[in-house]
Image (tube, rainbow, N blue to C red):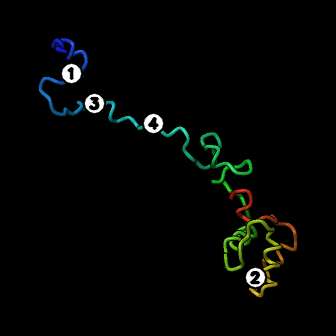
Amino acid sequence: MATSKSDIKGFFKQTKKFGGITKSKAKSSSSSTKKPPSPKRSATYGSDITQPPALMSHGSPDLEDDYDAKEEVLRQFDMNMAYGPCLGMSRLARWERAKALGMNPPKDIGHLLKAGKVRAECLWEGRV
């Protein structure tokens, strides 16, 4: 089973004459001043073109939420776990449950919810 020397060179990867690890040569200075390319799918405010579909919710980008002071107060109510979980029920049902259990939810939240001019579902509805 003797093999010739030329067969072995064709089979095994050839090594460098001087061996060792060599560093790549530095690029010219003109190419080092260029800006790196921007990512293809970066999240930017106000642009729905560059945002991936995972950041889209209810047809509008998550980075661009337009809501008023009433909605902000209701979102704070949604995030306050002292009144129990909010998924699977409306905000009004959660407020009434907290009131029935003696948790003393804020009365201004109840007035906002009973007026009916705000979103009925909680902050996490459709997102979780």
Kindly report the distance in space between the C-alpha atoms of the residues bearing marks 1 and 4.
36 Å
Residue 94, given in percent of the width and then of the height, sits at 79, 74
Whichever of labels 1 and 2 marks the residue nearer the N terminus, that label is 1
Q: Which residue is mark 2?
A: 106
Binning the other alpha carbons within 10 Å of mark 4 as few (below 14), some (14 to 19) or many (20 upward) gives: few
> What kind of element bears circle 3?
loop
Say which amino acid is labelled 3. Lys
Residue topped by disc 3 = 27
Q: Quadrant of the C terminus?
A: bottom right
Q: Which residue is mark 4?
A: 37
Q: Do the numbered discs 3 and 1 sit on residues whose CB atoms are within 8 Å? A: no
- The amino acid sitting under disc 4 is Pro
Q: Are marks 1 and 4 in contact (CB under 8 Å)?
A: no
* Foreground of the two, 110 or 20: 20
Tell me residue 85's x, y (percent). Answer: 71, 72
Q: Is the residue under label 2 in contact with that under label 3 (CB below 8 Å)?
A: no
- The residues bearing labels 3 and 4 have C-alpha atoms spaced at a distance of 17 Å
* Mark 3 or mark 4: whose residue is earlier in sequence: 3
27 relative to 98 in the view: left or right = left
Q: Residue 98: x percent and y percent?
A: 77, 81
Distance Cα–Cα, label 1 vs label 2: 78 Å
Helix, strand or loop at label 2? It is loop
Q: Which corner quadrant of the image does residue 16 belong to?
A: top left
The numbered mark, 1 or 4, whose residue comes first in the sequence reads: 1
Look at label 2 and name its amino acid: Pro
Tell me how far mark 3 sits from mark 2, CA to CA: 65 Å
Q: Residue at x 78, y 85 (%)?
A: 101
Q: Residue at x 73, y 47 (%)?
A: 59
